[in-house]
Amino acid sequence: MDKLVIQGGSPLNGEISVSGAKNAALPILCAALLTDGPLVLGNVPELHDIATMRKLLAHMGVKIEAAGEAGLSLDASDIHTCEAPYDMVKTMRASILVLGPLLARFGHARVSLPGGCAIGSRPVDLHIKGLQAMGAEIHIEHGYIEAKAAKLKGARVFMDIVTVTGTENLMMAAALAEGTTVLENAAREPEVVDLAECLIKMGAKIEGAGTDVITVTGVASLHKAQHDVVCDRIEAGTYMVAAAMTGGKVKLNNARADLLDAVIDKLRESGAQIEYDSHSITVKSQGVLQQRGALKSVNIRTAPHPAFPTDMQAQFMALNTVADAVATVTETIFENRFMHVQEMQRLGANIEVEGNTAIVRGCEFLEGATVMATDLRASASLVLAALVARGETVIERIYHLDRGYERLEEKLGQLGANIQRVK
Ligand SMILES: CC(=O)N[C@H]1[C@@H](OP(=O)(O)OP(=O)(O)OC[C@H]2O[C@@H](n3ccc(=O)[nH]c3=O)[C@H](O)[C@@H]2O)O[C@H](CO)[C@@H](O)[C@@H]1O
Ligand SMILES: C=C(OP(=O)(O)O)C(=O)O
């Protein structure tokens, strides 16, 4: 199994390019199921999760071909099964996003329940409730969601919790339903907006994406389209925290500051200087390598967009471990998203967990050790901690990182980090 070996202590300087967003690309790949197509996508990141989704779609009969640099062309004109088997779904929760499109276009779907993942129980009851409101008959049998609907009907769907994949599944289903669907308390995440923009290019009638009420007027069919996936705000945010912690000057190209308000706010509060234009972000920071106490501790509370993203919680925990005072980090989205705490403690971090809040006391320095990556963003946070730790850190089980960061060691290496992948 691959490991990362990081020698801490190098400030980061230079320019890198941010990839397309995993969490936008995955639902958009599923949108290909809604049409004879083809759907031609650009800025698709080369990630393990994308390969898993390609495998699942290919299993159903979608023909997928490379289309230029970081591009894919998907043709779903010859689908031979509407089943998403357990073996393919178990490794990636986003597989649930085939449910809405399959049901809307073919009238039936059999999709394995996505197993509980490490960061929380992650139920899909709101996806099911929404599809039932649209007239689907749904049963859970032998671990599979069995869904049928001769024709989905528009409905008013209220979601009592903001759900990103739930909003995406229902928006795709509603695109081909008869009549108008109103999604209340919808997720406002930029990835939902990007999916809506792609669906609109395919002929869908969608209003309000990016607000908490999305109105979808169903159409009889969707058609071919071309769409470039939005840049990955979480990848960008991760490198921004890296630059703030180590110090130096890092420019991120293909990055959008307007998607990162909460993160930029907190980084500025910690002492980093941030400048941006419409397609790049530059972070300048003194960092803790040059001066101990250079970063201020910052309190974090995760919540749905536009509040602070859960996918950046672990990275800010890393920053707080070497900041000048005490901070609280509160996780409100997932009940088990503090698995990085134990590993950071192995590096010498001073963190106490009380319920869904971690109290992080900044320490003078972290010390390299062998640690284990436990989930995607936890792994990223260990990389950040290792960049400022004294000596060598070995991060094991980095297959989690490969799910969501494209060429991470190459990009950080380009900025001057001493980081190597060991096979
Ligand atoms: C609102 C939010 O921040 N969502 C995050 C969530 O999206 P993801 O789509 O994976 O998760 P949801 O947005 O659906 O879940 C948000 C919350 O709603 C609950 N829930 C969800 C669906 C459902 O049917 N029933 C239910 O109770 C979940 O348990 C969770 O507590 O994880 C992704 C990966 O880390 C992040 O990119 C998203 O930003
Ligand atoms: C946890 C994540 O992804 P997933 O929802 O695919 O597990 C993430 O993107 O941080």
Image (spheres, rainbow, N blue to C red):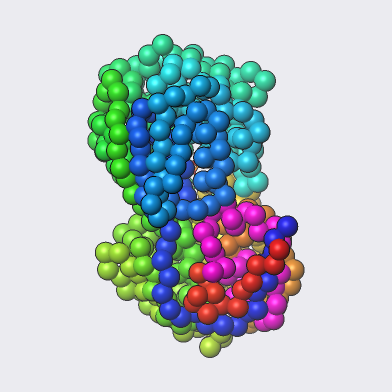
**Residue in the picture at 69% in, 61% down:** 2
Q: Position of residue 60 (x, y in %)?
A: 52, 28
**Residue 420 visible, this angle:** yes
Which residues, given as a range, are shown in magenta? 382-410
State the count of labels. Answer: 0
Instruction: Report if residue 400 lies within the magenta region.
Output: yes
The quarter of the image holding the N terminus is: bottom right
Using the image, determine if residue 82 lies above or below residue 208: above
Q: Is residue 210 left or right of residue 132?
A: left
282, 20: nearer the viewer: 20
Residue 33, located in which quarter of the rendered image? top left
Q: In this view, does 417 lie to the left or right of 132?
A: right
The quarter of the image holding the C terminus is: bottom right
Using the image, determine if residue 285 lies above or below residue 215: below
Residue 74, located in which quarter of the rendered image? top left
Using the image, determine if residue 26 lies above or below residue 220: below
Instruction: Report if residue 365 lies within the magenta region.
Output: no
184, 204: nearer the viewer: 204
**Residue in the picture at 65% in, 54% down:** 399
**Residue in the picture at 56% in, 38% down:** 55
Q: Where is residue 311 in the image (x, y as percent from the top left)?
A: 51, 54
**Residue 136 visible, this angle:** no
**Residue in the picture at 68% in, 71% down:** 5
Using the image, determine if residue 352 lies above or below residue 93: below
